[in-house]
Amino acid sequence: MRLFGSASPFAPRLERRRVVDRAWEKYVLGGEQPAELSDEIRRSWARAREKYGIDPNLPQPRRILRRDELEARRECDPVLRIASAILEDFAARLDLSGHVLAYLDGEGWMLSIDGDQRVVDRVSQIEFRPGANWAEDSAATNGPGTALAEGKPIEVFASEHFVSTWQAWSCAAAPIFEPGDDRPVGLVDITGPWEVQRRQAILVARAIARAVQERLQAATGVRNEVIRHALLAMRNSGDALVGVDLGGRVLGANEAATKRRIVTAGALAPDVKKAIADALRGPTRPSGSEVSIQAPDGKLIVASPVQYDGRTVGALLRATVVAKSAQTSARALPTARYEFSRILGRSPPIQRAVELAKTASRNTLPVVLYGESGTGKELFAQAIHTASDRRGERFVAVNCGSIPAQLVEAELFGYESGTFTGARREGNPGKFEDADGGTLFLDEVSELPLPAQTALLRVLQEREVVRLGGSAPRSVDVRVIAATNKPLDEEVRAKRFRRDLFYRLNVFFISVPPLRERGEEDLALLAEVFVKEAESEVGRFGLTLAPAALGVLQGHSWPGNVRELKNVLLRAAAIAPDTCIGPADLVLEAGAPLLSTPAAAASAGGLPRNMAPESEREALVAVLDECSWNVARAAERLRVSRMTLYRRLHRYGISRA
């Protein structure tokens, strides 16, 4: 089979060569921007000159492996084993006369070459051979290197090469991607003399890359399941465990790993991910040997390679959980687990709240977090503490509404021995003393009884506590963050909350928005993360959320906010019969309104919330008729999303037919 079909006239290629030659001379000699060239080539030339400082007369690529290094890299490359058979098949079926077919890894190292032996010998004179690195920082503009940099198929014709030594050739390269990774893991390149190569070369390179990618996707699925099963077998060992593939992508984690902040929002910290990927793919690492990596908290993580079919396919990351037997050692450690990176969302309301919280972390003023139940107020409080100068001290949380009224003061301020029946014989420090030097989080602060409010005001003013039954004051240095789901100013007017305490606490006010005000994009982002987090808790992997199920979630009003969403998805992850969570797997709060925002439920242009099912069905049909069954226009009229409208149409069996 001919690779490029019949030869095309030489004259157009010669004219193109002249145009590109002139552009190259103007750029290299005079610094004139090459308007005649594509954006990709212009960007590549700029990188070669300004970023990498490459000599246009470079005789060979900057980096070349020794033979033993090449063999080691070939041996550990996870894509080459799959690509080799496909490359051999294409080379056998295609007429490669006058051309070579090369495979390069995701870092630009050539690992194999095939094709016309005369051309193989000629290109070896410029070190276009296995063992040479053709990434742009080693060889400037060229097919494989520029395809790697741009992340898409690229043709580099003759003097479009920045280095004059390569300008006798034209090359067409296409990247290979692994599922879930936006960086190429390999490249297919077809190279030939500029006067011979045809434009069809780029199409052939893309076809070969696509064939490798499809085979790689199937193999990746098998390898990932092997890693997940290894994690599942070890998940109850007591250690913090994370399963990762060769690229350091998280495939699963147990709860201990999440608490240790080894995994945040379903991913490793970038520095840990890179270190893991480098260690697992490194050509000099002995097969099966463990690797130690430093985690963000300073502890060592041990990576135990997972083997399949005689090769390393990933690893289990293990961090031993140390038991705190002594109370003093427990007090010495900070207990806040969350950072600002854990607060997910792009909507303006959540971004405003985060920016205010970041400002609060840079001072020690008292903070009041106001928001409905389940909006994540403690998450904000922990993030403020973790980003503050007190991050190395304790974060102590107290739910003021869960403490019996007669014990509130003893819990907060402590008590001396013999103060009351049932108390500890040696007395007990309160939460303020526990949090000395750190942060005290008072959740549901509006539920404090008035006597406790009076004592709290004194502590805030004097920065000292007196234990119940005692008389000696004890100095404390505590930053107070309070949270409430009731407007404190209204509680003051109702005389349930002291006005002077309100002024003392409410120095820095932050409103945490309810989920229904954060928009569909935030909900979709949170849902994706919660499904991934639920996998390790229920012992399942590969779970996804069907678009119809997401539509149901986006149509719910979420009275329980983020906490309710997380619980709904955790239950769905446990009971879904398939790996794809559908609408039938979601159990939402009974009677909750199904319109996405309060505005959507308003009667002006919308449907009343208490409308009977048959009446609502008739109203929907009437609106659709008025809008000529244009769903987008009808959704706008009803002030709901199109997904919500589609869900309602499905529920009532409404169709245009």
Image (cartoon, grey):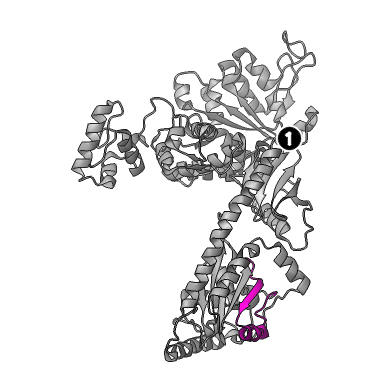
Crowding at mark 1 (Cα within 10 Å: few <14, some 14-19, many 20+): some
Give above or below for 583 relative to 114: above
Q: Secondary structure at mark 1?
A: loop
Could you tell me which residue is drawn at 51 percent across and 24 percent down?
499
Q: Is residue 391 left or right of residue 519?
A: right
Q: Position of residue 210 (x, y in %)?
A: 52, 64
Using the image as rendered, state which of residue 129 and residue 500 is in the foreground.
Answer: 129
**Residue type marked 1:** Gly
Q: Is residue 517 magenta?
A: no
Q: Is residue 32 left or right of residue 264?
A: left
- Number of labels in the image equals 1
Could you tell me which residue is drawn at 58 percent across and 33 percent down?
378
- Residue tagged by mark 1? 238
Using the image as rendered, state which of residue 557 and residue 418 is in the foreground.
Answer: 557
Q: Position of residue 15 (x, y in %)?
A: 44, 90
Please say whether residue 31 is visible from this viewpoint. no
The furthest residue to the top: 421
Q: Position of residue 321 (x, y in %)?
A: 75, 37
Q: Position of residue 387 (x, y in %)?
A: 63, 44
Which range is magenta?
106-131
